[in-house]
Image: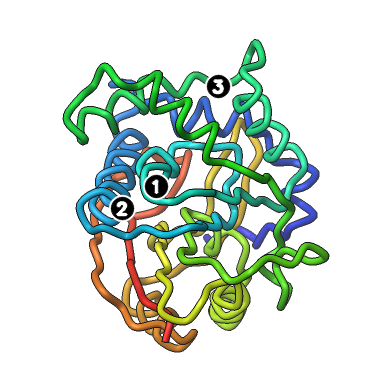
Amino acid sequence: MEAAFSDKQYYAQHFDPKGYLETYYAFSADKEAEKALTVFTLKNLHKAFTLGGLKGDTLIDIGSGPTICQFLSACESFREIIATDFTDQNREEMQRWLRKEPGAFDWSSIAEFVCELEGDRERWAQKEEKVRSSIKRVLKSDVTQPRPLAPVSLPPADCLLSTYCLELASKDLPAFRSALRNIGSLLKPGGHLVLATALELTFFLIGQCRFGCLYLEQKALEEAVKEAGFDIVWVEATKISFPLPLIDATGASFVVARKR
C-alpha cells in the first residue's frame, strides 16, 4: 500500500537529521543496501565532476539535507558552493559540521572513500577542509515555488546539483515536472543539472516516522528532465534491494543533463 505523501510542513515538523544520517549514511558493513546507494552516488559524482570535467564558478545544491558528501568531488571543480534546504534543522545540522561542533556527524569514512577514488585515501582531512571552504552560503529553498530561493536572488549558476530531493518533495508527476522547471530557473543556459533520484520509492523511515514519497520510474524521470528544458548527457541506473520495512525503493538513477 502506498504511503500518504508527506508535504513540506511534515518534514519541517518531523524530519530528524541525526536519525537520518545515522540510518542512511553510517557507511558500515551491516548497512549493505544503504552503503551501496551511497557508493553508487559517490562514484557517479566522481564521474561527473572529477572524470567528466564539469566545472565552473558556482554550484547550487538543491535539497542538501544535513549531508555534505555530495560536495566531496564537486568542491574541487567549483569556486563556490551554495547549499540549500527547506528545513531549519537540516541547515543547522550542516552548519554544525561546518563549524566543527562537538557531536557533528562524522563524514571521515565517506571522505576517505572519495579520496581513494581520486587516488589518495589519506587526503580525507584536507578534503573535508576543502568542502568547508567551498560552501559559501547555506540558504532556505523550496522547490514548489517558481523562485526556489526567494527572497534571495542569485546570478544563474554554472551547475545545479540535487540528490534524493525532488522525489521526496513532489506529490505527483506534474509536481515533479514543475519542481524541475523551478530549480532549472537557477541555472544558466548551457549549464549542467546533476540529479540523483531514488526509483520506485513510496516511503522511507527515520526511526518510527514514515515519510511518503513519489513513485517514479526511470522513463518518467528522463521524460521529465527533457520536458523541463534539458538535454540528457548521460544516465546511470542501479538496482538495490533495500531492507523492508525501512525503505521500499528498488534502485537509483543518476542523470547529467545540459540546460538548453
Q: Which mark is residue 74?
A: 1
> Mark 2 or mark 1, which is nearer the start of the sequence?
2
Q: Which mark is residue 105?
A: 3
Q: Where in the figure is residue 146, as x and y percent of width and height? A: 71, 78
Q: Which residue is mark 2?
A: 49
Per the image, label 1 sits on a secondary structure element best described as helix
**10 vs 194: above or below:** above
The residue drawn where x is 65% and y is 62% is 5
CB under 8 Å between discs 1 and 2? yes
Quadrant of res 185: bottom right
The residue drawn where x is 42% and y is 68% is 193
Position of 88 with respect to 28 (left or right) is right
Q: CA distance from mark 1 to mark 3?
A: 20 Å
Per the image, label 3 sits on a secondary structure element best described as loop
Quadrant of res 257: bottom left
Position of 128 with respect to 251 (left or right) is right
CB under 8 Å between discs 2 and 3? no
> Mark 3 or mark 1, which is nearer the start of the sequence?
1
What amino acid type should be assigned to the residue bearing mark 3?
Phe
Task: Mark 2 vs mark 3: give the one in front.
Answer: 2
CB under 8 Å between discs 1 and 3? no
> Mark 3 or mark 2, which is nearer the start of the sequence?
2
Q: CA distance from mark 2 to mark 3?
A: 24 Å
Q: Label 2: few (<14), some or many (≥20) within 10 Å?
A: many
**127 vs 160: above or below:** above
Q: Where in the figure is residue 9, as x and y percent of width and height? A: 79, 55
Q: Nearer the viewer, residue 248 or 55?
A: 55
